[in-house]
Amino acid sequence: MKASPHGIDAVRAQLDRVILGKDDQIRLCLSCLLAGGHLLIEDVPGVGKTTLAHALARSLGLSCQRIQFTSDLLPGDVLGVSIYDRDTGKFRFQRGPIFAQVVLADEINRASPKAQSALLEAMEERQVTVDGHTLALPEPFFVIATQNPHDQVGTFPLPESQLDRFLMRVELGLPPPAAERELLNGVDRRELTGALPPLLDTEALRELQRRVQRVHVAPALLDYVQALLARTRSDDAVAGLSPRAGIGLLRAARAWALLAGRDAVTPEHVQAVFPAVAAHRIAPREDGTALAARLLEAVPVP
């Protein structure tokens, strides 16, 4: 493997033209989706969270539905409802926006915990249960959620069980001065996003995901990942990472390696994705990024 796949390179370049000055964050987002995980984009309003989510969905060429999470949102607004059909005398299930390949859950923490819980089964099992019937969701299936800081008015903290369903949490931050200047002088980002062409199709994306699974992980690299997991469990200041989080960390590192054009994972690939995978798990109510950096420094590289 001499170079990263052409299709995903084009997607990355297209996203770079929309979200300026955020190359590392875009690589993390693409790594998350190539690894088959769900993505949480968190930051203050106005830095491009929803724009990035829309741009990702359009560039991947997948069916997409957006859900605006509000305090009065009900589970049925997400999953769908059964409607009585007078012509047949039977109830007919009308599918909700969850039945799309990409679901944009905008401002997810503005909804009540009851509405948030409608996503739990979908994100974990790729299916939903309604009126006693289990319905499969499309393949591939991604949730891309945006979230405002939990200390803002009108937000409900995501429970740990919901946070754990997200493979990565990415923070955008303010753009660098040069990028901000271009934003001020340039076209509206929403107009630019609406004109983006799809650069991948479903089969191309699934082939990239299969290639991620084939990226080599050496025994010494597994030792390093296990040492990181053990360190989180021995530190009283953080919540220890589960084996599921460790599996997700390896998937994300494989995807990062694929984007870098490598056929084997190195410690640097693990370090690149570790804060995005671990921070919202080890310190869900605080700034876990600094804690993740401290854990990386404490574990020697093999």
Image (cartoon, rainbow, N blue to C red):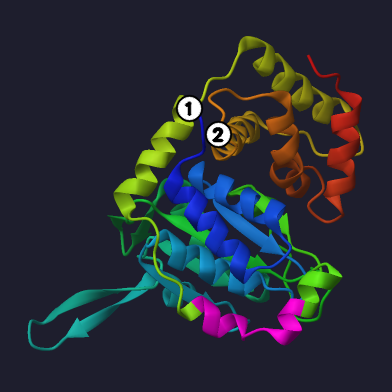
Amino acid type of the residue tagged 2 in the rendering: Gly
Residue closest to the eye, 18 or 208: 18
The span picked out in magenta is 182-193
Could you give the CA–CA distance between mark 1 and mark 2, rounded to whole angstroms? 6 Å
Chief secondary structure of the magenta portion: helix
State the residue at coordinates (83%, 67%): 176
Look at mark 1 in the image and give the residue it sits on.
1
Residue closest to the eye, 57 or 74: 57
Q: Where does the image place residue 223, in percent across and percent down from the top left?
A: 70, 14
Amino acid type of the residue tagged 1 in the rendering: Met
Q: Is residue 183 above or below residue 218?
A: below
- Inspect this view and state whether residue 105 appears: yes
The tag on residue 261 is 2
Please, what secondary structure does the residue beneath circle 1 have?
Answer: loop
Q: Where does the image place residue 7, in percent across and percent down from the top left?
A: 43, 49
Residue 287 vs residue 125: left or right? right
Residue 142 vs residue 179: left or right? left
Q: Where does the image place residue 182, in percent across and percent down from the top left?
A: 74, 78
Cβ atoms at labels 1 and 2 below 8 Å apart:
yes
State the residue at coordinates (60%, 53%): 29
Q: Is residue 139 above or below residue 177?
A: above
Residue most toward the bottom? 86
